[in-house]
Amino acid sequence: MSSESLDEYVAYSRQHFEEGLIRAGFREVEAGWQGPVQHAAGTTRVVIVLPPRFPFRPPRVAPVDHDAVPWSWHRELDGTLCLVADDDHDGLWWTDAPAFLEHVTAWFEHADNGWTDDRPDLDLDRYFQPSADRRLYLYDDLGQYLNRSVRFSPSRNGTMRIRHGTRPRKALKHSKDRFGYVADLGDVDVPPRTWADISARIDSSADLDRRIRQRSVAVVVLVYRRGTHKGAIVLDVAPTKDGSTAVTRLRSGADTEAARSARAGLLAPELRGCTVAIVGVGALGSFIADMLVRSGVRHLTLVDGDVVTPGNLVRHLVGPDAVGLPKVHAVKQHLVRYDETLASGIDVIDCALTSGDDAVDHLGKHDLVVNATADFATTALLHVSAQSLGTRVLSAALQNDGRTYRIDVLPPLDDTATLPPSTTNADSKAPQLFEAGCGSPISPTPPHAVIEAAAATARHAIGLLVDRPLHPAGEIRHLQSPSEMSLQ
């Protein structure tokens, strides 16, 4: 779309919407478009404002008489109606005036009914202006600090971390710590917007007000509940000349196991107790390990006898600081850096898998063994060992210079389900590259193919771990052309 076409689309959308408002009885005033919205409890006059980014942002709606509409979680800080959630932006549906006005009517109907069956969004942050302090304030389990004094101390990357402590009578001149207090707001039906609203809800508010005036408390952490969900907000507080308290919102976040795993996926709780061995933690195996850990797996055994060289880095999970380390130690170090709780759950074996006894041992001790060596002998050893034990191994490899990835469930879950034999792309014209100390050509497989194959392998591994396999035999996918179909 050219800039001229875009301008025409924006102008048409605005004109079309405004014509719809006129037909609905709205008239243009200095503040915007004013008109009536009828609902079960009566008629409320509102002002509709089209933002500069309309139609890509929805119109804003505010009651003409702000006090005529009860305050609730469904109003913004400036009193406008909260009409469109962040996850409801598909299709720009609000560009049609009748549809938008129906949505506004529905808002008032819900308000008349007291917002029954309301979604308990923990969005108290939006009712306070942001602080000039742009550092990130991190907290762990706030239960241990409830109704107690705390201090926030500077940490890396411009963060402030919570710990116990009160402001000393004679604070060190160059101390960068900030002192605060953790209080409980309880169940919050109507969001507070001022310190007076907050103070009315806190049992120890009188002493807290005094400490704020004395500047011994500059940060207040509020724990609150909305429905069955718990939230927290960190506020910057300071006394003003007129005796009130100024409140702004600090950037904050929970640094807890629950917070770190909340985005891991719905299967994370099931995966937490699973044990997985990954044989071969080169490029493919390292990313498989990373994705399984991020998905919830907390018990890994990493098996590999190689070390990290500079040439590995372009496709490997680890960075330059790992050059010279055994790959198993380098990958563990990377994963633990991401989450320190993994340290006790990751075992490393700094040697290649060569014996049947070791293969049987790994298959017997782990819920799943993933083979990412791309080595025929290792794959055959694990396959035969799995057959003898009546279990299975998941084997993954990249082929044809990264144009194909192959994931095999060995032996297949269903004897009738098999994948076709591997094929070699004879048309490859990529020049062969060698480096000293390597007895075979360097694979030109690109990094994106490694990551795509690792993601697919992780999906199959998770399916086997939770007893919901993606396919009884595995998957082959050719990445060279979109017209080539994957076998599933």
Image (cartoon, rainbow, N blue to C red):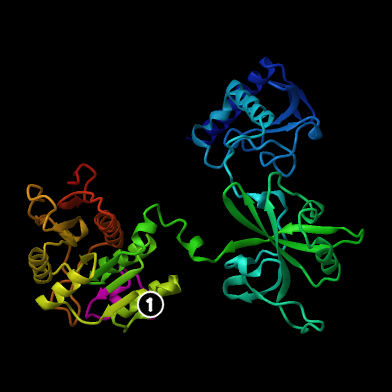
User: Going by the image, does 281 lie left or right of 263?
Assistant: left
Q: Is residue 308 visible?
A: no
Magenta segment's dominant SS is loop
Residue type at numbered disc 1: Ser
Residue shown at 29%/58% (left/top)? 458
Q: Is residue 486 in sight in this rendering? A: yes
Which element is circle 1 on? helix
Q: Start and end of the magenta stretch?
A: 302-321
- Give the quadrant of residue 270: bottom left
Residue 92 against residue 276 in the figure, above or below: above
Quarter of the image where one finds residue 217: bottom right
Q: Residue at x 49, y 61 (%)?
A: 258
> On the rendered structure, is 26 left or right of 387?
right
**Can you give x and y, in whole percent of width and height, for residue 40 in the image?**
68, 21
Position of 347 compared to 196: left or right? left
Residue visible at 24% across and 56% down?
Answer: 464
The image position of residue 197, as x and y in percent, is: 79, 51
Q: Residue at x 87, y 58 (%)?
A: 244
In the foreground, 146 or 478 = 146
What residue is pinned by disc 1?
344
In-front residue for pair 345/82 = 345
> Is residue 304 shown in magenta?
yes
